Amino acid sequence: MIDIAVPGFGLLELTAVVCDFNGTLARDGQLVDGVPELLARVSRLLTVHVVTADTFGTVRSALASTGCDVAVIDGPDQALAKAAFVERIGASGVVAIGNGRNDRLMLASAALGIGVIGDEGIAGEALSACDIVARNIGDALGLLLEPRRVIASLRD
Ligand SMILES: [Mg+2]
Protein backbone atom coordinates (compact mmCIF):
# COMPACT_ATOMS: atom_id res chain seq x y z
CA MET A 1 0.00 0.00 0.00
CA ILE A 2 1.18 3.50 -0.84
CA ASP A 3 -0.83 6.43 0.50
CA ILE A 4 -0.09 9.80 -1.08
CA ALA A 5 -2.04 12.90 -0.06
CA VAL A 6 -1.72 15.40 -2.90
CA PRO A 7 -3.08 18.89 -2.15
CA GLY A 8 -5.79 19.75 -4.65
CA PHE A 9 -5.54 16.39 -6.43
CA GLY A 10 -6.74 14.08 -3.69
CA LEU A 11 -5.70 11.16 -1.54
CA LEU A 12 -4.17 8.28 -3.48
CA GLU A 13 -4.53 4.91 -1.73
CA LEU A 14 -2.60 2.68 -4.08
CA THR A 15 -2.59 -1.10 -3.75
CA ALA A 16 -1.59 -2.24 -7.23
CA VAL A 17 0.39 -1.18 -10.26
CA VAL A 18 -0.77 -2.23 -13.73
CA CYS A 19 2.02 -1.93 -16.24
CA ASP A 20 2.29 -2.24 -20.00
CA PHE A 21 5.21 -4.38 -21.22
CA ASN A 22 6.70 -3.41 -24.59
CA GLY A 23 7.83 0.20 -24.75
CA THR A 24 7.32 0.50 -20.99
CA LEU A 25 9.12 -2.29 -19.09
CA ALA A 26 10.80 -3.72 -22.18
CA ARG A 27 12.44 -2.71 -25.41
CA ASP A 28 12.00 -5.06 -28.37
CA GLY A 29 10.70 -7.73 -26.01
CA GLN A 30 13.62 -7.60 -23.53
CA LEU A 31 13.47 -5.98 -20.09
CA VAL A 32 15.09 -2.56 -19.81
CA ASP A 33 18.22 -2.57 -17.62
CA GLY A 34 17.46 -2.22 -13.92
CA VAL A 35 13.78 -3.15 -14.20
CA PRO A 36 13.90 -6.43 -12.22
CA GLU A 37 15.49 -4.68 -9.23
CA LEU A 38 12.97 -1.84 -9.35
CA LEU A 39 10.02 -4.24 -9.67
CA ALA A 40 11.32 -6.15 -6.65
CA ARG A 41 11.32 -2.94 -4.59
CA VAL A 42 7.89 -1.83 -5.81
CA SER A 43 6.41 -5.29 -5.22
CA ARG A 44 7.05 -4.91 -1.48
CA LEU A 45 4.51 -2.07 -1.55
CA LEU A 46 2.10 -2.89 -4.37
CA THR A 47 0.84 -5.93 -6.25
CA VAL A 48 2.48 -5.78 -9.69
CA HIS A 49 0.40 -6.75 -12.74
CA VAL A 50 1.75 -6.67 -16.29
CA VAL A 51 -0.88 -6.49 -19.04
CA THR A 52 0.24 -6.87 -22.62
CA ALA A 53 -0.52 -8.14 -26.08
CA ASP A 54 2.98 -9.72 -25.84
CA THR A 55 3.89 -8.77 -29.39
CA PHE A 56 7.30 -10.46 -29.14
CA GLY A 57 6.12 -13.53 -27.19
CA THR A 58 8.68 -12.89 -24.45
CA VAL A 59 6.76 -11.54 -21.48
CA ARG A 60 6.44 -14.72 -19.43
CA SER A 61 10.10 -15.71 -19.72
CA ALA A 62 11.31 -12.13 -19.24
CA LEU A 63 9.34 -11.74 -16.00
CA ALA A 64 9.60 -15.32 -14.72
CA SER A 65 11.97 -14.48 -11.87
CA THR A 66 10.16 -11.31 -10.78
CA GLY A 67 6.95 -12.79 -9.34
CA CYS A 68 4.81 -10.30 -11.27
CA ASP A 69 1.30 -11.30 -12.26
CA VAL A 70 1.26 -11.47 -16.08
CA ALA A 71 -1.95 -11.09 -18.09
CA VAL A 72 -1.62 -11.58 -21.84
CA ILE A 73 -4.57 -9.90 -23.51
CA ASP A 74 -5.95 -11.24 -26.76
CA GLY A 75 -8.44 -9.67 -29.06
CA PRO A 76 -8.75 -6.63 -31.24
CA ASP A 77 -9.49 -3.97 -28.64
CA GLN A 78 -6.47 -3.89 -26.36
CA ALA A 79 -7.34 -0.46 -24.98
CA LEU A 80 -10.72 -1.61 -23.68
CA ALA A 81 -9.30 -4.89 -22.38
CA LYS A 82 -6.53 -3.14 -20.43
CA ALA A 83 -8.99 -0.65 -18.93
CA ALA A 84 -11.37 -3.49 -18.03
CA PHE A 85 -8.50 -5.21 -16.21
CA VAL A 86 -7.87 -2.04 -14.18
CA GLU A 87 -11.58 -1.70 -13.36
CA ARG A 88 -11.77 -5.37 -12.34
CA ILE A 89 -9.03 -5.08 -9.73
CA GLY A 90 -10.34 -1.69 -8.52
CA ALA A 91 -9.32 1.43 -10.42
CA SER A 92 -9.34 3.60 -7.30
CA GLY A 93 -6.34 1.68 -5.95
CA VAL A 94 -4.40 1.38 -9.20
CA VAL A 95 -1.46 3.24 -10.63
CA ALA A 96 -1.25 2.47 -14.36
CA ILE A 97 1.98 2.84 -16.35
CA GLY A 98 2.16 2.72 -20.13
CA ASN A 99 3.30 4.34 -23.34
CA GLY A 100 1.06 3.14 -26.14
CA ARG A 101 -2.17 4.39 -27.65
CA ASN A 102 -3.80 1.22 -26.34
CA ASP A 103 -2.81 2.27 -22.80
CA ARG A 104 -4.85 5.48 -22.97
CA LEU A 105 -8.02 4.13 -21.37
CA MET A 106 -6.28 2.42 -18.45
CA LEU A 107 -4.15 5.52 -17.86
CA ALA A 108 -7.34 7.57 -17.68
CA SER A 109 -9.31 5.17 -15.48
CA ALA A 110 -6.60 4.45 -12.91
CA ALA A 111 -6.35 6.65 -9.82
CA LEU A 112 -2.87 7.63 -11.04
CA GLY A 113 -1.72 7.32 -14.64
CA ILE A 114 1.98 7.55 -15.46
CA GLY A 115 3.05 7.81 -19.09
CA VAL A 116 6.53 6.62 -20.10
CA ILE A 117 8.44 8.04 -23.07
CA GLY A 118 11.27 5.49 -23.04
CA ASP A 119 12.86 4.43 -26.32
CA GLU A 120 9.59 3.98 -28.25
CA GLY A 121 8.10 7.34 -27.36
CA ILE A 122 4.59 7.83 -26.06
CA ALA A 123 1.43 7.99 -28.13
CA GLY A 124 -0.21 11.41 -28.16
CA GLU A 125 -3.49 10.04 -26.82
CA ALA A 126 -1.66 8.23 -23.99
CA LEU A 127 0.19 11.43 -23.19
CA SER A 128 -3.02 13.40 -22.83
CA ALA A 129 -4.65 10.66 -20.71
CA CYS A 130 -1.99 10.36 -18.01
CA ASP A 131 -1.40 12.45 -14.89
CA ILE A 132 2.40 12.49 -15.03
CA VAL A 133 4.81 11.77 -17.89
CA ALA A 134 8.15 10.13 -16.99
CA ARG A 135 11.22 9.96 -19.21
CA ASN A 136 11.67 6.24 -18.69
CA ILE A 137 10.50 3.29 -16.59
CA GLY A 138 13.17 3.94 -13.97
CA ASP A 139 11.80 7.42 -13.34
CA ALA A 140 8.22 6.12 -13.40
CA LEU A 141 8.82 3.43 -10.77
CA GLY A 142 10.97 5.91 -8.85
CA LEU A 143 7.87 8.07 -8.39
CA LEU A 144 6.29 5.19 -6.45
CA LEU A 145 9.39 4.64 -4.34
CA GLU A 146 9.73 8.37 -3.57
CA PRO A 147 6.09 9.56 -3.39
CA ARG A 148 7.08 13.12 -2.55
CA ARG A 149 7.95 13.41 -6.24
CA VAL A 150 4.30 12.67 -7.07
CA ILE A 151 3.18 15.37 -4.66
CA ALA A 152 5.62 17.85 -6.18
CA SER A 153 4.31 17.16 -9.69
CA LEU A 154 0.57 17.08 -9.00
CA ARG A 155 -0.10 19.46 -6.13
CA ASP A 156 -1.97 22.71 -6.57
MG1 LIG B 1 3.73 -0.24 -25.01
Image: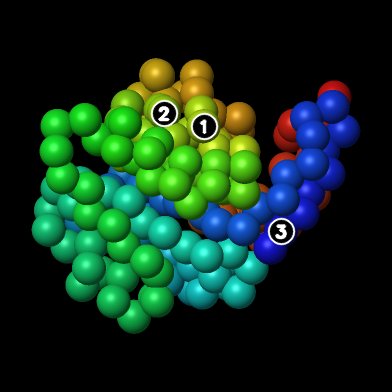
> Disc 2 on helix, strand or loop?
helix
Q: Furthest residue to the front?
A: 88
Q: Residue at the spot x=54%, y=70% of the render?
A: 43
Gap in Å between the C-alphas at discs 3 and 2?
23 Å
Q: Is residue 60 left or right of residue 13?
A: left
Which of disc 1 and disc 3 is earlier in sequence? 3
Q: Residue at the spot x=47%, y=41% of the render?
A: 87
Q: Are marks 2 and 1 in contact (CB under 8 Å)?
A: yes
> Disc 1 on helix, strand or loop?
helix
Q: Is residue 106 left or right of residue 119?
A: right
Q: In this view of the protein, which residue sits in the foreground, 151 or 119?
A: 151
Amino acid marked by disc 3: Ile
Relative image position of residue 23 (x, y in whole percent): 31, 44
Q: Is residue 68 left or right of residue 43?
A: left
103 lies above or below 52? above
Report the residue marked by disc 3. 2
**Mark linked to residue 105:** 2
**Mark linked to residue 109:** 1
Q: Residue at the spot x=60%, y=33% of the render?
A: 132
Q: From where the camera sits, is residue 10 visible?
A: yes
Q: From where the camera sits, is residue 135 visible?
A: no
Q: Residue at the spot x=40%, y=36% of the render?
A: 83
Relative image position of residue 34 (x, y in whole percent): 45, 67
103 lies above or below 54? above
Which of disc 2 and disc 3 is earlier in sequence? 3
> Disc 3 on helix, strand or loop?
strand
